[in-house]
Amino acid sequence: MRSVLIIGAGAAGLMAAVFAAGAGAEVTVLERNEKPGKKIYLTGKGRCNVTNDCTMEDFLREVPQNPRFLYSALSFFSPEDMKNLLAENGCPTVTQRGRRVFPATEKASDVTRTLVRVAQQRGTRILLNQRVKRLLIGEAGRVTGAETEEGAQRAADAVILATGGVSYPATGSTGDGYRFAAEAGHTVLPAMPSLIGLESKEAWPRELQGLSLKNVRITLKKGKKSLYSEQGEMLFTHFGFSGPLILEASCHLPADIRDCMLELDLKPGLTREQLDARLQRDLEAGSRKQIRNILPGLMPGSLAEIFPSICGLPAELPCNQVTASQREVLVNRMKTLPLDISGRRPIAEAVITRGGVSVKEVNPGTMESKLIPGLYFAGEILDVDAHTGGYNLQIAFSTGALAGHSAATAD
Ligand SMILES: Cc1cc2nc3c(=O)[nH]c(=O)nc-3n(C[C@H](O)[C@H](O)[C@H](O)COP(=O)(O)OP(=O)(O)OC[C@H]3O[C@@H](n4cnc5c(N)ncnc54)[C@H](O)[C@@H]3O)c2cc1C
């Protein structure tokens, strides 16, 4: 019987165990924490957006980093398979807005509990409080096991590295696996925060802390080049910008953020001409008012309060004195309000880590290392990351399932 050692009992490691044990291997999982799946408990704000009920094509569109690498893994274990696996094991799911799938109980703990139970029912041993220190690689260049911090050496025919990235390190993902992979000769691309809030260069966005804008369009630009443009919801915070649109935009932000900026369209449903006509009507209707008093018809009150000064106009300017060029400035700013970014929030706060083990050195059909026979990778440790919507967990589940199956059935 083949022995498979899995390092890390997160989403990827647990699914690898389910499949490796299901394929008849003797499976041991080593987890440094006192309990498995610590990060899963935090997902979807405790509700766990476990996957996304979409087609392969739609799925790959949500993966800015190395989507094609995932083709085999997603074919081997799809979002549909994930829903079925949970339902068949007493954890039915519901599909909500944006095809996001959650456990029907809306409790992340039910997902973890189900995966642990299925893995154990198939014979997996999960050993807790076991932090792996290094991989064991034999003279033939083949992986032969791993050594824990206590110095215990565990031999195995195959080892699956499922140690995650470096975001939310309190959940156990502190980048140990990157070190193991690099020591084994793998290229590890620098870890960067992704799905992360962005810091504002200017003070005014921070003054709007707590304000959420719905149905706006955000365009991320580097110089004149547009890198991302989408409509949805964003949030002003004590550091600058967050909310779904900003998190997604952050996935497309290059490592070097020089010349990068966001453009906010407050009225994506209106052309400049339509917005100008609307503004003209509002100015005429409120001709005796100050401009700050008519702007709340076009934007939330707190933004309306400071919007004239963002446009370089006095807030007290009477509506009947607004010139055509001043109106043009107001319209231009409503359609393309520049949000200057000074940086990303720290990686510890990122929902996902970009970078990691280069997929060029991993066989996409098996998840096995192309450099070290018997070594497999699964989950966030790999240089793949996706938008929000259940895609990142599904990537962990699909790569975990394929790695587990391949490790258990290799010759
Ligand atoms: C706040 C938050 C919310 C999220 N919500 C969602 C969501 O709703 N939907 C979604 O799709 N994605 C979500 N994600 C992303 C998702 O959680 C990750 O993509 C996924 O958990 C990655 O799984 P993984 O198994 O690769 O890594 P991890 O879950 O990080 O697991 C790695 C495991 O390896 C263990 N480990 C590390 N080093 C060692 C070592 N040396 N020895 C032994 N064990 C070790 C760790 O303790 C950990 O248990 C969210 C992430 C965060 C931070």
Image (spheres, rainbow, N blue to C red):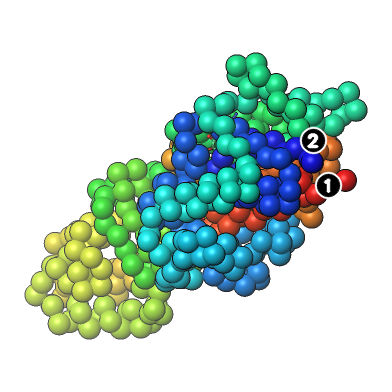
- Identify the residue at horizontal 55%, vertical 54% (top origin): 393
Return the residue found at the far left.
Answer: 288
- Identify the residue at horizontal 57%, vertical 62% (top origin): 85
Residue 79: image location, x then y, percent: 59, 65
Left or right: residue 136 compared with residue 53: right
SS at circle 2: loop
Residue 157, numbered circle: 2
Quarter holding residue 83:
bottom right
Return the residue found at the far top.
Answer: 151
Q: Is mark 2 within 8 Å of ligand 1?
A: no
- Identify the residue at horizontal 48%, vertical 71% (top origin): 99
Q: CA distance from mark 2 to mark 1?
A: 10 Å
Q: Which residue occupies the foreground of this view, 290 or 25?
A: 25
Residue 62, numbered circle: none
SS at circle 1: loop
Residue 174: image location, x then y, percent: 54, 31
Question: Given the image, on which type of amino acid does mark 1 rest?
Answer: Ala
Q: Which residue occupies the foreground of this view, 218 or 38?
A: 38
Q: Can you identify the residue that label 1 sits on?
A: 410
Dots 2, 1 in contact, CB < 8 A = yes
Residue 86 seen in the figure: no
Question: Given the image, on which type of amino acid does mark 2 rest?
Answer: Asp
Residue 33: image location, x then y, percent: 49, 31
Q: Height in image: 61 above or below 162?
A: below
Name the quadrant of the N terminus: top right
Sort mark 2 into few (<14), some (14-19) or many (20+) by Cα contacts within 10 Å: many
Residue 258: image location, x then y, percent: 55, 44
